[in-house]
Image (cartoon, helix red, strand yellow):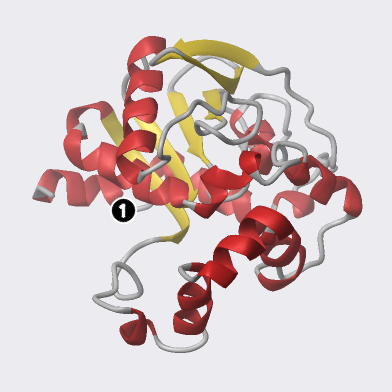
Amino acid sequence: MTQKMSRRILLQGTAATIAVAAMLPARAEGFTPSTDMPFEKKYVDVNGSKMAYVDEGTGPVVLFLHGNPTSSYLWRNIIPFVLDNIPAVTTQYRAIAPDLIGMGDSDKPDIDYTFADHAAYLDGFIETLGLQDITLVIHDWGSVLGMRYARLNEDNVKAVAFMEAGIPPALPAPSLEAMGEPSAQLFGMLRSPAGEEAVLQGNFFVEEVLGKMAVATPLSQEVLDNYRAPFPTPDSRKPTLV
């Protein structure tokens, strides 16, 4: 990554404002968090499959990338902060939040769902919509995809705000053992036959990770039901497993 891109990675300007809003939406004056998805989904054809996405507002592009096993629903209470309907916000942006391929309301094509597959669909999505001068707001699995895009397309990325990202020194790790506990135990289990059964049969990432392990405040059943909806069967959960 070039020095130019490294400077852009710093949380500054637009990205810093969004990051603060992401941490404290419930405390903003005049804003009430919602369990409903308040934005209508649109659809675009990418590599022969439909990708669902939210596209609200006008102005500079802010592209939100979710992680595993979430969707654009993750950003439902964050997107209003880049529009003009929050008293504390005085500048409007164009907020775009896709459902990554195989997740949310996007299609589940018969692909391997590797990193390369996800990157190809994300690149295709950005190209098809003609997105330029992008501010990336990225989380979890979406952070790895977003940083890869920024590294390869630095002239098209204005800034990056990241949360719970796959970054050093935690990741990438040279081995499971190097991750330390409890991460080594968790990832070791997920890479075993028992892990495959837990994900495909038990919807592990929704029921256990979102439902119990990775949240500071328990999610309501309504919120969990929104995250369950894209993964009703073992076959539909392949994207979360891979």
Who's the residue at 38% across and 61% down the image? 166
Residue 121 position, x and y percent, is 38, 27
User: What's the residue at 70%, 36% (across, down)?
Assistant: 230
Decide if residue 239 is on the left or right side of residue 28: left
Q: Position of residue 124 (x, y in %)?
A: 35, 20
Label 1 environment density (alpha carbons within 10 Å; few <14, some 14–19, many ≥20): some
**At numbered mark 1, what does the secondary structure look like: helix, strand or loop?**
loop
Q: Is residue 61 left or right of residue 210?
A: left
From the image, tell me which residue sits under label 1: 10
Q: Is residue 22 above or below residue 209?
A: above
Residue closer to the observer: 187 or 15: 187
Q: Foreground residue, 18 or 174?
A: 174
x and y, in percent, of residue 177 in the image: 34, 87
Q: Is residue 168 above or below residue 53?
A: below
Q: Is residue 206 visible?
A: no
Residue at image x 36%, y 42%? 146
* Side of 210 relative to 240 (left or right): right
Direction from residue 191 to residue 33 in the image, left or right:
right
Q: How many marks?
A: 1
Instruction: Answer yes or no: is residue 82 visible.
Output: yes
- Percent across and percent down for residue 106 are 59, 25
Give above or below for 130 relative to 134. Answer: above
- Amino acid type of disc 1? Leu
